[in-house]
Image (cartoon, helix red, strand yellow):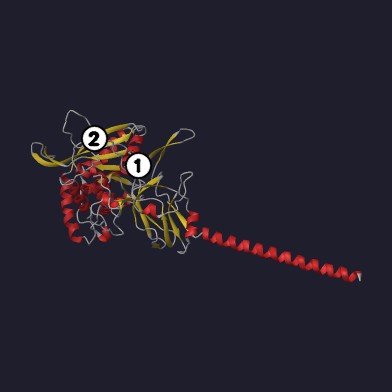
Amino acid sequence: MFLQRSSRALQRQWRLYRGLNRTTEIQVRSALIRGFQSTRNLQVVKPVLLADIGEGIVECEIIQWFVEPGARVEEFSPLCEVQSDKASVEITSRFSGVVKKLHYEAGEMAKVGKPFVDIDIQGGASQEALDALTEPEPTTEGASEPLNRESLSKPPQTQSATGETVDSAAQAQPESQPPPVKKGKCASLATPAVRHLSKELNVDILEIEGTGKDGRVLKEDIYRFVEKRNSPTQSAQPTSPFPSIPLDTDKQTETTVQLTNTQLQMFKTMTRSLTIPHFLYADEVDFSQLHDLRRRLNKVVLQSAKEGEVTKLTYLPFIIKAVSIALNQYPILNARVDVNGETSKPTLVHRSQHNIGVAMDTPLGLLVPVIKNVGARSVLSIAAELSRLQSQAAAGKLSPQDLSGGTITVSNIGNIGGTYVSPVIVEKEVAILGIGRVRTVPAFDNDNHDKVVKKQVCNFSWSADHRVVDGATMARAAEVVRKIVEEPDAIILHLR
C-alpha cells in the first residue's frame, strides 16, 4: 500500500515538472522569435555614409538630389551631386532599395563620414521600423499632442455680424488667387554653373520655374526671373548680394558676403603659400617661329581630325611640353619640400612624372586641373587633354583626380590680358610659370641688325621657392624653355 501511494505521488510530480518545462520552453521560443523579428526590422533600413571624396575634405555642399523619398534606386545609380572645395562629384548608391529619408536639403553642407540618405534595402519596411531607426523630433517639455488635430490644419474661424461662421484666412486673402505653379520632379536640379549664377544674383533656385528637361532650371530661367523681379511693377524691392549705389554718395555702405567653396579653398591654399619665400625671374620670349609652326600644323590637324578630336592647336601645349623637357634637365623644379613632423628636418621629395597643373578661369572661379605624365605625351595629346579639362571645368564636372597630384603649375593669364604677372607658388610645389599676353612688336632682325621686322613676343614670369631653388638654377631652366619655344623644331629631338 505504501509503495502504491509513493508511486502515484512520483507520477504527479513528474507530470507537473514536465508541464513547467514545456511552459518555459514555449516562453523562451517566443522570446527568440520576437528577438529575431526585431533584429530583421532594425537591419532593413541602411544609412548611407558620405564617403571621403578627396584629400582633407571634411564637408561638401549638396548641389542637387537625383532621388526623393519613396523613389526606387538600384545599386550604383546616382543619388546626388556634391560640390567640395575642389570639384563636383556624383554620389552613387551602394544598395538597391527604396529611399526613406534625405538627411540634407539641396544647398546644405553634408559632413564626410555621416549618413546623408537612408535606403530600405528590402523595399518593404514598416513605418514602425522606420520610426524606430530615426531619431525622435525634439519636443518642448510639458507639451502634448492636442486632441483636436483639425485645429492645427485649419485656420481659426470667426463669427460675422450676421451670425455666420467665416474662416479668418478667407477674410485675409483676396477672392481670386492664382494657383501655385506645379513644378516637375527635377525643378531643383541645375548644373553647378547655373547654381553659381543663382548665388551671385541672390536667387533661390527653388522659386524658379525651370524650362529645361523635366523642369530643370537653366541660365535663361534665372535671367528671366531676375528681370521680372527687378521690374518696376514689382512692389517688393529686389535684394542683391552687392550693395546698390546709394542716392546719398557721402554715406558709405558695407555688405558681408560669404565666400564660395572655391574662394574658401583659394583662401586656405594662398594662406599656406605665404609661408614660402618667393623670388621672381622674368624673361621675354620670341614666339615668331612658334607662330609660323602652329599655323602650318593647324592646317594638318584640321584635315586629319576626326569627330570629337582637337581641330586647333594653341601656344599652351607647346609651352607645357617645353616645361616638361626642362624638368628632365632640372628635376629639382619637379620636387616638393617635406618637413619631418618629429625632427622638423626638411627634405626634398623628387617625383618621376611631370604632372603639370594649368590654372583656368571657370564659372566657379579659379581652378587648377592637372595634365598627368606630360613627359610621355606628345603635343597633340597634351592639347587633347587640355581641351577635355577645359570642357569639364566650364561645366563644373572636374573630378578630384583631375585636380590632384600636380608637381608644377603653368598660369596662362595672357589669354585674358596683361603682360607681366607675379605668380604664387602652390603648396607642395617649388615653382610656377606665369605667361603674359602675346603681342606684336617691332624688333631688329636676328641676321640683319639694321633691318626692323615684326615679331611676336611674350613675357614669361617664373616664381620659385628660394628655400631650395637658387636663382641660377631657375635662370638655366627658364633658358631651356625659352630656347625650345623660340625654336620649336627642337621638340623633335626630345621625342621618345
Image coordinates of residue 207 in percent, x first then y, are 27, 51
Q: Is residue 331 left or right of residue 440?
A: right
Mark toward the start of the polypeptide (2 vs 1) = 2
Q: Amino acid at mark 1?
A: Asn
Neighbourhood count class around disc 1 (C-alpha, 10 Å): few under 14, some 14–19, many 20 upward = many
Quarter of the image for residue 209 reads bottom left
| Proximity of marks 2 and 1: CB atoms separated by less than 8 Å | no
Mark 2–mark 1 Cα distance, whole angstroms, equals: 19 Å
Q: Which mark is residue 282?
A: 2
- Pick the front one: 176 or 460: 176
Quarter of the image for residue 474 reads top left
Q: Which mark is residue 438?
A: none
Q: Secondary structure at mark 1?
A: helix
Residue at 16% across, 33% down: 247
Q: Amino acid at mark 2?
A: Ala
Report if residue 104 is visible in the image.
yes
Quarter that holds the N terminus: bottom right
Relative height, residue 58 to residue 94 (above, below): above
Label 1 sits on residue: 334
Image coordinates of residue 253 in percent, x first then y, are 23, 32
Q: How many marks?
A: 2
